[in-house]
Image (cartoon, grey):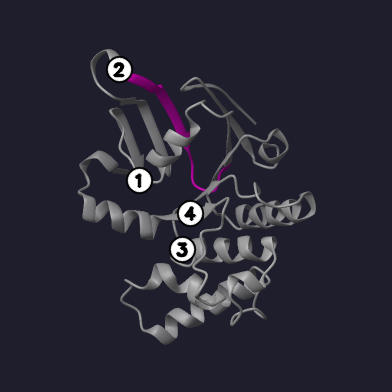
C-alpha cells in the first residue's frame, strides 16, 4: 500500500469577510507532500502563500476543502488537540528566529518540551544532542544576542527538531541572513532532508527555492505548477 502523504490539501479555499466585502484568498488548492520530500513554495507578496502557511501550520483553518496532516483531518480536531498537533507534529522555522531573548540556547531549544512527559534530564540530553548536530554544542549557555544571525537560525532549527516532528515548516528561513550565512543554513536544511526529514519551505526567492527537491508556484491563490 502506498504511504499516505504527510500533507494533503484537497480543493482548499480561504475567504475573509462577508457578502460584497468577501475576499477570496485561496481558490481551490490541491497539493500532496510525501514523507521525506523537500518542497519549496514560491510566491510573491499577495500570492496567498502567507495564508496557506497559516493553514499548513494549523494557525488557521480553511473555509472549504480538506487539509490532512499525517493522515488526520485538521477540520475534525478541537482547539486543544490542534495546539498539541502544532507542538508535536510541526517544527516551525521563522525568518525572525523567534527566540526568547532571556533564555539560553539550551533553554530555547527545550521550550517545545515543556509539556512533554519525559524527565527534564532526558529532555536536556536530547537538546544537547540536537545542538551538537547543528554545530552549536559549544554555545549551550549563550543567550541569543551573543550569537550571529546564522547561529540564531541554527538554534531555531534545533528547536524545530526537538519533538521529532512529522514535518519542518520554514517561512523565509534565510530572509534575515547574508548570502554566505544563507548558504550555510540551506546546506543544513539539505542535510536534514538527506536524513529523511519532510520539509516545506516558503520563499519568494528563486535561488532559495532551487535548493529544494520540488518547487510549487503559487500566484493569486492558485498553484500553477509543481516543478522538480
Residue 65 in magenta stretch: no
User: Of helix, strand and loop, which mostly describes the magenta segment?
Assistant: strand
| Relative horizontal placement of residue 47, taking residue 72 as reference (left or right) | right
Which badge, 3 or 1, is on the more N-terminal residue?
1
Check disc 4 and report its element: helix, strand or loop. strand
Dot 4 alpha-carbon crowd within 10 angstroms: few under 14, some 14 to 19, many 20 or more? many
Which badge, 3 or 4, is on the more N-terminal residue?
4
Q: Is residue 174 above or below residue 114?
A: above
Dot 2 alpha-carbon crowd within 10 angstroms: few under 14, some 14 to 19, many 20 or more? few
Q: Label for residue 12?
A: none
Residue 2 appears in the figure: no
State the CA–CA distance, disc 2 to disc 1: 25 Å
Q: Position of residue 204 (x, y in %)?
A: 62, 34
Q: Label for residue 21?
A: 2
Image marks 3 and 1: residues in contact by CB distance under 8 Å: no
**Residue drawn at (37%, 47%), measured in percent from left and top?**
70
Which badge, 4 or 1, is on the more N-terminal residue?
1
Q: Residue furthest toward the right?
A: 180
Q: Label for residue 58?
A: 1
Check disc 1 and report its element: helix, strand or loop. loop
Image marks 2 and 1: residues in contact by CB distance under 8 Å: no
Image marks 3 and 4: residues in contact by CB distance under 8 Å: no
State the CA–CA distance, disc 3 to disc 2: 42 Å
Image marks 3 and 2: residues in contact by CB distance under 8 Å: no
Q: Label for residue 164?
A: 3
- Residue nearer the viewer, 174 or 3: 174
Q: Label for residue 92?
A: 4
Image marks 4 and 1: residues in contact by CB distance under 8 Å: no
State the CA–CA distance, disc 4 to disc 1: 11 Å
Q: Quadrant of residue 17?
A: top left
**Residue drawn at (56%, 75%), measured in percent from left and top?**
105
Amino acid at each position: 500500500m502506498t504511504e499516505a502523504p504527510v500533507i494533503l490539501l484537497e480543493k482548499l479555499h480561504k475567504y475573509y469577510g462577508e457578502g460584497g466585502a468577501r475576499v477570496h484568498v485561496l481558490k481551490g488548492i490541491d497539493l500532496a507532500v510525501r514523507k521525506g520530500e523537500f518542497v519549496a513554495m514560491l510566491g510573491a507578496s499577495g500570492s496567498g502563500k502567507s495564508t496557506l502557511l497559516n493553514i499548513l501550520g494549523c494557525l488557521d483553518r480553511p473555509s472549504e476543502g480538506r487539509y490532512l496532516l499525517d493522515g488526520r483531518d485538521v477540520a475534525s480536531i478541537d482547539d486543544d488537540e490542534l495546539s498539541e498537533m502544532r507542538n508535536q507534529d510541526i517544527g516551525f522555522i521563522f525568518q525572525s528566529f523567534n527566540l526568547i531573548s532571556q533564555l539560553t540556547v539550551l533553554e530555547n531549544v527545550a521550550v517545545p518540551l515543556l509539556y512533554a512527559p519525559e524527565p527534564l534530564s532526558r529532555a536536556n540530553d536530547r537538546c544537547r544532542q540536537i545542538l551538537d548536530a547543528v554545530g552549536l554544542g559549544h554555545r549551550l549557555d549563550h543567550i541569543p544576542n551573543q550569537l550571529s544571525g546564522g547561529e540564531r537560525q541554527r538554534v531555531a532549527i534545533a528547536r524545530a527538531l526537538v519533538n521529532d516532528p512529522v514535518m519542518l515548516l520554514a517561512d523565509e528561513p534565510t530572509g534575515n541572513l547574508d548570502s554566505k550565512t544563507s548558504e550555510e543554513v540551506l546546506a543544513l536544511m539539505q542535510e536534514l532532508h538527506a536524513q529523511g526529514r519532510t520539509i516545506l519551505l516558503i520563499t519568494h526567492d528563486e535561488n532559495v527555492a532551487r535548493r529544494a527537491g520540488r518547487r510549487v508556484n503559487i500566484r493569486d491563490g492558485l498553484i500553477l505548477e509543481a516543478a522538480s
